[in-house]
Amino acid sequence: MDYWKSSIQRLFITFLSVIVLLLAGRIFFFLDYLPTDFWGKASWFEVMLVFLSATRFDVSTASAVILLPVLGTLLLLPFPKGLRKLWRMITHWYSQICLYTTVLIIIVSHYFFYYYQDHFNSFFWEFWDNWENSKLVIWSIFDELPILKLSISLLVLLVWVNVLHKILQHLAASLSGLFSRKISLIMIPLLLLVGSRGTFDPLPLTMQRYREQVSAIPHLNLIHGNPYYELYSSWEVTIKASDSSMVKLFLKQSTTEIPQWFATVAELDNNRKFRGVDEATFHLEYQVPALKEKYLKQKPQHIVFIFMESQSAWLSSYKEGGFQQKIRQNLNKIKKQSLSFSHFFQAGGGTLNNIMQINLSIPTNEYSRIEFSSEIYKPFSTTFPRIMESQGYIPLFFYGGSLSWHRLYHILPKLGYHQIFGESSIQNVSKTRFGVHDADLFELVHQKLLQAKQPTFSFVMTLSNHPPYGVPENFVGQVTSSNAPSKLKKRILDEDNFDKRMRALAYADQALGGFFRKAKKSPYFKETLFVLTADHAHPMALKWEPEERYQLRKIPLFFYSPALLKTSNTVNDNFGSHIDIPPTILSLITEKPVMVHSWGRSLLEPPKSKLLLSNEINCFNDVCIASNQVYVLQKDQKLVLCKTTLCIEKSKHLTKIIKAFSNSGSNYLLNYHIVKSE
């Protein structure tokens, strides 16, 4: 067989192998994450159409993979055999690398979705930005993912690669007549150029992927594409949204729209005003109402803000078999004596992002990684700790893990915290590879409160409910996959992971209860306001339907102080997120209205507009947008796909508001010039 025919035949096998592997990965994803009621909504015909449409992405990827080797083979035709032989060896290894890379990216994509319930997103790229955090993520893989299932699926795909090569060899041999020089020298490169584009539509595939949904069924939309395109799309979106230079360029090109964004945000609350004359001075002033007389008997001597790891509000909905007593006994006792909020959500996309959202009270777009922006080091006058300091409190920060995590030791002082305590502050206790147990962290907080000579504001960030779920060895969890409530048991995808999470949740609740039992016996308790919320919700490797996304993403928010609160066991149904926490706390403790720069608002006052802006769900009244789809929020808090022109029109107004909040927040963060007198 001559050089051209044999080379093209091998590259043709690689081309087909990549397509078949991507198809196998799509089938695996389709079956593994198949919703229970899928076939009640979809037909085989629709499934086949979506799979057929998705092959465009596979053909495009495979064509792009072998285009350069084909062109190289073509260009080397006139050269000596020795050079051609070297090129054949290079293309052989190139093909092998491409095939095994495809296997790897299929597995990574599949199990990334298992954890995040999303294709590649900003968290994937954060992994490469911060090696200190990445080491922890690598360790967590063994605690968070179903390793046996992952290993088997990887092994099956690796075996399939080798079997596939032998099968396709016979197919390629039978089609060898197509590889003659006269026919293929011109046709094959041209076909590959067309194939790489993957479409005759003027719009490229990279943009078609998100131009519209191919189906009304979310699960089918998730399989429309392939891991390479999802990876590229997440990178493109993340870079555009999180790279400061790109955002600054966008803002520079939007100078006429910037004041409109600020004005739109200001109009949504009677206490919020738009100030400034240009991009360097534009800001929002929010007049925090003075509500102390209404809600508190006196101003607190101390404020303890507890930022609980992965504490989802949906856990409270399972009552069967004493479930609440076993994992949330203490948290539920606190709630019964608290002012609580039933529609509260995370503002950002992860723990650190939400720390920034709370402390700055500035919204950014969904993909913006505010924690990596140097702009957060600006001396903003109304960060959370500086607001508390202006009210007479010394701001302190407590974390059970290493302060080198995301360089907390560097970031937190810039935000205004006077003292920062990490695991190194806690001696002579057992530790996990992440840090100390929650009970030991709370003991440190307890001791500092006992020793305090001046009013303090303590931001306490817990750890034990984070992978690897490090709890004391002698602690026994009472909830497992075998005795979980029946409705919860049906959702379990990974029994081992579920058991670890339930044990960690129960321990975290026990540690919280132990802290409050000690606090109640201490003199500071009657003078302290405790505020409890979570860093984010978590699906906990359970099966969730798209219509349950609203319930899934809620987190608790409790204001607790039996001696200080005039009202307790009260539930507030205002929409809210992390950025509303500083103005809400401030409104509780201030005796006169205070002006702050904030996109948040006091959740204790009725809103002018019922608006929710959070990380994954945004709602205006009963119309919500999540994952680029429009829903209507039902009374049972389930989401139903919008099917009327009325809710579509309302969603356009909501989209305008979302953009106004995130873009005005970005302008303030990146362009606002801080005057020293502030």
Image (cartoon, rainbow, N blue to C red):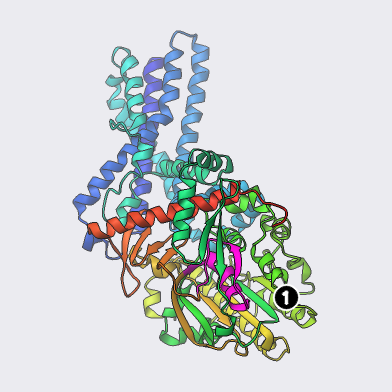
Seen in the picture, residue 358 relative to 365 is either above or below; the reply is: below
Seen in the picture, residue 356 relative to 395 is either above or below; the reply is: above
What residue range appears in magenta? 576-603
Is 113 part of what is drawn in magenta? no
Taking depth in this image into account, of 29 and 655 the one nearest to the observer is 655
Left or right placement of residue 392 versus residue 579 in this view: right
Is 583 part of what is drawn in magenta? yes
**Image coordinates for residue 302, horizontal then vertical, percent:** 69, 79
Snapshot quadrant of residue 211: top left
**Any part of residue 326 in sight:** yes
Q: Residues within 10 Å of mark 1 (few under 14, many from 20)?
A: many
**Image coordinates for residue 464, horizontal then vertical, percent:** 62, 71
Q: Residue at the spot x=49%, y=15% of the render? A: 84
**Image coordinates for residue 280, horizontal then vertical, percent:** 60, 46
Left or right placement of residue 551 versus residue 465 in this view: left
**Any part of residue 347 in sight:** no
Q: Residue at the spot x=20%, y=53% of the render? A: 44
Left or right placement of residue 165 versus residue 347 in this view: left
**Image coordinates for residue 48, horizontal then vertical, percent:** 23, 47
Taking depth in this image into account, of 63 and 357 the one nearest to the observer is 357
Number of numbered discs visible in the structure rendering: 1
Seen in the picture, residue 246 relative to 452 is either above or below; the reply is: above
What kind of residue is marked 1?
Thr
- Tag 1's secondary structure? strand
Quadrant containing the C terminus in the rendered view: bottom right
Taking depth in this image into account, of 454 and 535 the one nearest to the observer is 454
Kindly identify which residue carries mark 1: 456
Quadrant containing the N terminus in the rendered view: top left
